[in-house]
Image: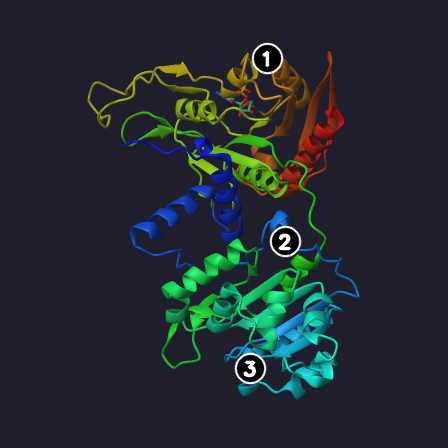
Amino acid sequence: MASLTIRKLDDAIKSHLRLRSASNGRSVEEEVRVILRDYCEGRPATAAPAPTAAPAQSERPTAPQAVHGEARVTLIIGGGIAAYKALDLIRRLKERHIDVRCVLTRAAQQFVTPLAASALSHQRVHTDLFDAGSEFDAGHIRLARECDLIVVAPATADLMAKMAQGHADDLASAILLATNRPILLAPAMNPLMWNNAATRRNVLQLRRDGVAMTGPNAGEMAEAGEAGVGRMSEPTEIAAAAIDMLRPPKPRPLAGKHVLITAGPTHEPIDPVRYIANRSSGKQGFAIAAAAQAAGADVTLVSGPVGLRDPAGVTVIRVESARDMLDQVEAALPADIAIFAAAVADWRVASEGAQKLKKTTAGMPQLALVENPDILATISRLKDERPPLVIGFAAETEHLIDNAKAKIARKGCDWILANDVSPATGVMGGDRNTVHLLTRKGKDIDVDSWPVMTKEQVADKLVAAIAKALEESS
Ligand code: CTP
């Protein structure tokens, strides 16, 4: 069967896939699987729950101001049983020093009163598009614009349908149509309504329009005996998503760069059931992939067998042996930055048994080993497609810096992260790492020793060092 390589798709499709996968918290590969499954099952979009889905910076309307005492949210409360939780949401937002102005739809007033929302928000509550008190100066336009963010909680199926279609026949829908501010929806509805093809279409349309969503969550419904995806996110979750959107956009120093990363161990087969392996967990390489993705890079992660989830928005290619890893790394080129964090097995068995090796009276099998290709050295020595920045790791148990200096020269890479992997350090398989960054400076090699950190912190610091080097070289 023909194989599909995501890297070889058109740039526009890749960028759409990356956005979609990151906002759904899936790897690019998983996202493609979901799209294909939905297509085969005749669904316009996935029926899976949508986690927080902040739109990409480029899709967001006017950038909101920082979260401080003056951040303002217009909270539209839709008509559903979850409306009672919107009262708690007002409290949560106020606790975070956010000014909240509430709008209640006609249906919402069946569940909560304007008086309760007004008492909690310390503001007048708005309910009517044709309210002489506020519409004399186009109040709905002010509610739509004089805020940093619009939150709709609960976002009912009906309200979402109206938004997707651009209706404006009541105050809530008129505000949503007239705004140029970011919008966060907290959908809440019966699971059958959420999974209905019409709602799926509307959700897809709203996402394309740059609307962010938090939830819905899975769980019990208000209707006795019903459960599924459709519960509104908890007020603390909605407040956290709102705060995220109110923060100034994060810098994306690696935007437009392709970062290629290897991670994990390799498994070198002895026979169909046995293999040679090592203790690498893949955590450091996966953390670097996540940090590079968060910094805006297009990331390909080629990983040996590990028990880790694919980082969101990253193209993950799973391999077994060193030779498979090299093939996939070469197929993923060109790259702007290549980081080799994998603990590749140095040797493999010369001739892999086609059948399980059996115990015989003739004695122990003799396993002859041959050397595996050195992926880092191979890529560092490429003539045409050598990535401009090649970074290796040096896993040592003695003479850390001296061995790492020798390795940087032997392998021909630009930087090396040297770490002590002696059992006493707990680095192999653990969550923390102590590394020294060695960088070539002409004929010299600089050594920068970092304090003990979590593997995520090491990843962030490495990405920051890469971003700084890129800036200096441009
Ligand atoms: N590496 C590689 N391919 C190999 C072996 C290692 O790409 N066949 C890479 C690793 O991903 C790492 C660097 O080379 O970035 C150094 O790996 P390490 O295990 O520290 O060193 P080795 O090359 O295996 O040398 P030695 O075992 O002698 O220390």
Residue assigned mark 2: 60
The answer to whether residue 293 is left or right of residue 218 is right
Find numbered disc 3 in the image and state the secondary structure of the residue it sits on. helix
Residue assigned mark 1: 410
User: Which numbered disc, 1 or 3, marks the residue that appears first in the sequence?
Assistant: 3
The answer to whether residue 151 is left or right of residue 441 is left
Say if residue 427 shows up in the picture: no
Q: What's the CA distance linking mark 3 and mark 2?
A: 28 Å
The percent position of residue 395, horizontal first and vertical second, equals 58, 26
164 versus 27 height, above or below: below
Identify the residue at horizontal 40%, vertical 22% (top origin): 323
At label 2, the amino acid type is Arg
Q: What's the CA distance linking mark 1 and mark 2?
A: 47 Å
Identify the residue at horizontal 37%, vertical 56% (top origin): 44
Question: Quarter of the image holding residue 236?
Answer: bottom right
**Dot 2 alpha-carbon crowd within 10 angstroms: few under 14, some 14 to 19, many 20 or more:** many
From the Cβ of disc 3, is ligand 1 less than 8 Å away?
Answer: no
At label 3, the amino acid type is Ala
From the Cβ of disc 1, is ligand 1 less than 8 Å away?
Answer: yes
Find numbered disc 2 in the image and state the secondary structure of the residue it sits on. loop
Residue assigned mark 3: 108
**Dot 3 alpha-carbon crowd within 10 angstroms: few under 14, some 14 to 19, many 20 or more:** many
Which quadrant: the N terminus?
top left
355 versus 249 height, above or below: above
261 versus 204 height, above or below: above
